[in-house]
Image (tube, coloured by chain):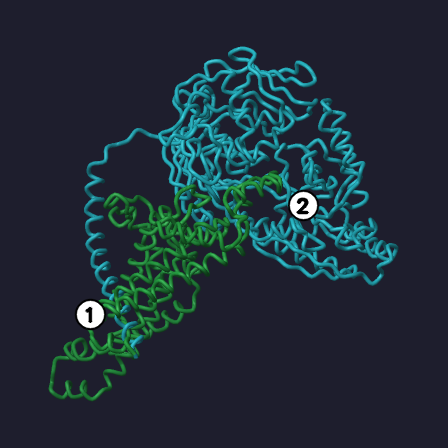
Chain colours: A cyan, B green
Amino acid sequence: MKSSTMRKAGKFSVLVIALIVSALLLVGCGEGEKKQEAEKAAAPEAPAKVVLKLAMDADPVSLDPQVQLSGGMLQYSHMVFDPLIRYTKDMKFEPRLAEKWERIDDLTMRFHLRKGVKFHSGNELTADDVVFTVARFRNSEDFKGLFEPFAEAKAVDKYTVDLISKKPYGLVLNMATYVFPMDKAFYTGTDDQGKAKDLVIKTDYSYANTHESGTGPYVVTAREQGVKMVFTRFKDYWDKNTGNVDEIVLTPIKTDATRVAALLSGDVDFIMPVPPQDLDRVRSTEGLQLVTMSGSRILTFQLNQKRNAAFANPKVRLAMAYAYDNKGVVEKIMKDFATAAGQMSPEGLVGYNPACAPRYDLEKAKALMVEAGYPDGFEATMIAPNNRYVNDEKLAEAFVGMMSKIGIKVSLKTMPKAQYWDQFDAQVADIQMIGWHPDTEDSGNYYEFLSMCRNAETGYGQYNSGNYCNAKVDELTLAAQTETDPAKRAAMLQEVEKIQYDEAGYIPMHWEHLSWASKSNMNTPEIVNVMNFPYFGDMMIK
Amino acid sequence: MFAFSVKRILQAIIVMLIISFIGFSIKHSFGDPVRELVGERVTPAQRAEIREKLGLNDPFVTQYVRFLNATLHGDLGRSYFFKKPATEVIVNKAPATLELVFCAAFIIVVLSIPLGIYAAIRPKSWLSRITMGASIVGVSMPVFLTAILLIYIFSVELHWLPSFGRGKTVLLFGWWESGMFTWDGIKHLIMPSIALSSIMLPLFIRLIRSEMMEVLETEYVKYAWAKGIKPWRVWIIHAFKNTLLPVITVGGVQLGIMVAFTILTETVFQWQGMGSMFIESVERSDTALMVAYLVFVGFVFVLVNTAVDIIYGLVNPTVRVAGRK
């Protein structure tokens, strides 16, 4: 009795509050309308400003380009900063802050900087800023691995800088695309909290997390994390032959359906990514354009040879590779929004080997199972994420179905990505799904992380949960790192693909496609690229 | 009275301890926050180093005691993602959620009362039939679907209302971001409020109607008719007043549930309130913010309930007597 009377009292008070607020609301609505009318009357004709309303699935986590190595941060870096050089659409390098570059010797690459480039703070870009930026990578958890092969950056004169590697290194230019010079003068000294301005801090306040001074086409003029970010065209931007957008308003919209609806209703002008189920809708809507491109993230299943003895037998692995219908999956589950893969490197990367095409032959698979000594198959466990890759759960289920045809009974468990990666690292199942995008845009990166023998000391094979290990793969991958002749490198990397293909070191699935959608009056196809960092600085709106 | 208050407050403290303990102990099953903070190429050794720095490797009890200690000093920890104190993040997001809930509650109150009464008085009229039919549809449609449908009809097809976000907001009292004082903000509020109210509204119409019909059959209403009192007086003063009691009881419970429903509505409309913040913190394994949210919300509920109980004890001595048992 006691509790029931008290509960009633609580409820009553809540209702009273609700009523009061409702009343307030009514008043509020009235005022709002009046205000609106007043605004209408007073608003002067503003000069035409070209504004791009952009919706992505997330917004940049920080203003510090070195705090996290992720797609979102690179997209941001290309808007607010400029790299020394950048990729063109066909994966060549084009000059940005470095006007030209030359190899001095095996270890040294010389970059000649553009003169008269201004930072947002007004300071001029010099070689010192590049040296500062490269040195700062050492303090970044995410970047220090990438820049490990480099000894230092050295200023030769005011506009010339040398990038010196410890050993001959074949990917100096790829790495130069990550060097977004930061304003040394701006990031030096201490802020009003008494902390050094150049600190790289992931989880706490830092000056660089909330302030920026880059050379890029846009200045961050407003930012409410997770809600909205406003980029305003930098008046003194050095490149005058670029886009005409004066302001970009970036809103993160996480829910796929809402993001598409926002584009269809005209509330935003540009969305990325476009969810696969809405591609046709966007394509068929008048006034919109859809741009898709085959990406370089490979999805694979890794077969753990240490956990399941059957997987140590190459014939079993080959049988599984033959039993997996890449093309069928791409067509039925991915709705052709992916490219069936027989290897890790997509066309366009140096390691791409035309000989390693997707294979599907159920009869051959069955024969291989008999040959391997498993005519009745065997059992295996499997885990996969359910919110990491496009259709990941369905893909895993399809795999289970296909394996059952050759007698392999797979018990599958799927889970959210937040839980998945710990399980993946602990190798809790025989078969594990993983996708990989090479952050160097080079084939060698796939092998270093996914196929080389696991080695806790060097860190190679960090995500090789199949425990696939072939000395030849290791040897070739390492040799390719120090090979500076592109043709020789390509031959080595292509050989790695072939070795893995022939003994089915893993089961390749497909490369996910990338997608962008915008209004038709924009030059969207020209600014997007396979790395998925659209060059918004070059965007033209007619 | 003093003993009663002390007892209530002690109970509240125990409840808070339990909430914080549960919140804190489940956070480990939501994944490793460090994983979300670093790129894929960061080595396990580096990750372990970051975990160590954040104190995530300490034994559970050490972490919990540290957390309690900080909480007592008003510090609920820092959000890894927002890089700010968790309390600050929550307080920034609260106005959006509260305004949404208020508007939805407003829609429910304004619509359910007249419709419910009308459906009770004229059960056979076509308007009552439509209302009851529509309420069946409304109550059985998931909020998520209602929200998407609204967006497709009113934003995509008709271009009447904006599809996402809060629109233009104004700052009240220096911290309350309000969307209620600009026409743009109100336009943004309409669809989320309707979506949020779509579950409760039919429920209330049905509740009011059935309660009202029952009351209309009672002796004193019949007597009122016999006395020749004007119809509206019988309906409103005699019948409806007595209908209200159970409605208020249910209403209180439902308002709490509605705060929970904002999670779905906010996610669909990209409404930057506490609901979507909570869901996102779960997805990002931002466990510090997650726990802070649970404790914060728990604290608000406990605070309000305790205050109400104590005030009630002041007003109504029987509660105090009952409490002494």
The residue beneath circle 1 is: B314
- From this view, report whether residue A410 is shown above or below residue A445: below
| Residue type at numbered disc 1 | Leu
Q: Is residue B289 left or right of residue B10?
A: right
| Residue type at numbered disc 2 | His
Mark 1 secondary-structure assignment: helix
Q: Is residue A153 left or right of residue A379?
A: left
Crowding at mark 2 (Cα within 10 Å: few <14, some 14-19, many 20+): many
Q: Give the total of numbered labels.
A: 2
Image quarter (top left, top right, bottom left or bottom right) of the N terminus of chain B = bottom left
Q: Are marks 2 and 1 on the same chain?
A: no
User: Which of A107 and A89 lies nearest the eye of the viewer?
Assistant: A107
- From this view, report whether residue A403 is shown above or below residue A250: below
Chain containing the residue with disc 1:
B
Where's residue A192, x and y in %?
35, 30
User: Which of A365 and A44 lies nearest the eye of the viewer?
Assistant: A365
Chain containing the residue with disc 2:
A
- Give the residue drawn at x 25%, y 75%: B319
**What mark, if any, has residue A510 been given in the picture?**
2
- Give the residue drawn at x 29%, y 58%: B102
Q: Is residue A341 left or right of residue B257?
A: right
Q: Quadrant of residue B137?
A: bottom left
Q: Quadrant of residue A291?
A: top right
